[in-house]
Image: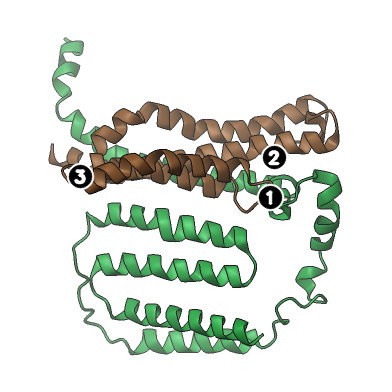
Amino acid sequence: MISELLINAFLVTIMLSIAIALIKTRTVIFTVILTSAYSLVAALMFITLDAVDVAFTEASVGAGISTILFLAAMAYLPQTEEESISSEFIPVLSCIILGGILIWCSFDLPEIGQLTAPIHQHVAPEYIKGSKEDIGIPNIVTSVLASYRGYDTFGETIVVFTAGVAVLALLEKKNTTKKNKSQPKQKIRKNA
Amino acid sequence: MHNNPILRISTKILFAPIILFGLYVQFHGDFGPGGGFQAGVIVASAFILYSLVFGIEAGKKLFPTNVNLILLALGGIVYGGVGIVSMILGDEFLAYNILGSSPQSGQHIGILLVEFGVGLTVSNVMIALFNAFAGYDKVKEK
């Protein structure tokens, strides 16, 4: 119990310091690296909650590939962020109020791992009981993801596909307009 | 980065093991942590690492853009196709029980194919995104 508390306190301290560093930094590359570090610590947090699958996703997607994509996109941004001219009073105040509300609401949350919590009373018991007989694979996360909740995962795949196609369409458009400049000659020939 | 021997050789050494690990995560997702999303990202990272070190043109030679775009769409088709096949065989959309001789083996085949579809789409979207971002500058200069 004490060791768990120590580990959690350690991780939260690292997360907080990364968050403060993120506010302070004005260099884009540091922002990207710090976001990646934040994701990695978040992945460790998920491991302490025994959510290995989520931790794996967070580490590979959040800390890994999104960092690379941010770095690739970063090349088109100015290297440093400009100091904002407007007053920071209202954003800081709204952040503090929102944070206060969230902390206040968190007192009403059931304790982690409590069996009587609504989240553990809905469909979860059925999935946990049925997984071994219905699906026959040891990893319940996979059986929920791919079989019980197959529609949701199908939707997720389509979302990833659509997002990819949308970005490609946006960036490809520029390419074709550039290419078109050299193409009109051919079109004239066709018309003639 | 083409001229740095440490990066070049370590990329050559790491490339195959990264893909092997990706395949392990992909097809071992039933038994351990992992699945299509994570595996797709891991496999994509191997190709992106290659592009980063040897240049985007070499990366496109290794993994041509048209193949990339076809596989990108194929992932969704594989996923949806499993659902259609289960419908044709007389069950509901994405009900895997009918795919095998016993309900459990049917589930096994269904999950494996579906996860494979997810992995295909995710990995190819990531590679395509990286190519789009990294290749954007060269087009602009022309």
Q: Report the residue at 58% width, 48% height from top.
A: A156
Task: Give me the chain letter of mark 3.
Answer: B
The residue that mark 1 highlights is A142
The front one of A166 and A18 is A18
- In this rendering, do the residues under marks 2 and 3 share a single chain? yes
Q: Nearer the viewer, mark 2 or mark 3?
A: 3
Give the residue at mark 2: B111
Q: Which class describes the residues within 10 Å of circle 1: few (<14), some (14-19), or many (20+)?
A: many
Name which residue type carries label 3.
Pro
Residue drawn at (39%, 65%) of the image: A36
Q: Which residue is mark 3?
A: B5
Mark 1, chain letter?
A
* Residue type highlighted by circle 2: Ile
Q: Is residue B83 left or right of residue B11?
A: right
Percent x, y of residue A101: 56, 87
Q: Residue at x 48, y 31 (%)?
A: B71
Chain letter for brown, please.
B
Residue A71, position in %: x, y? 29, 56
Amino acid under label 1? Thr
Measured Cα–Cα span from mark 1 to mark 3: 41 Å
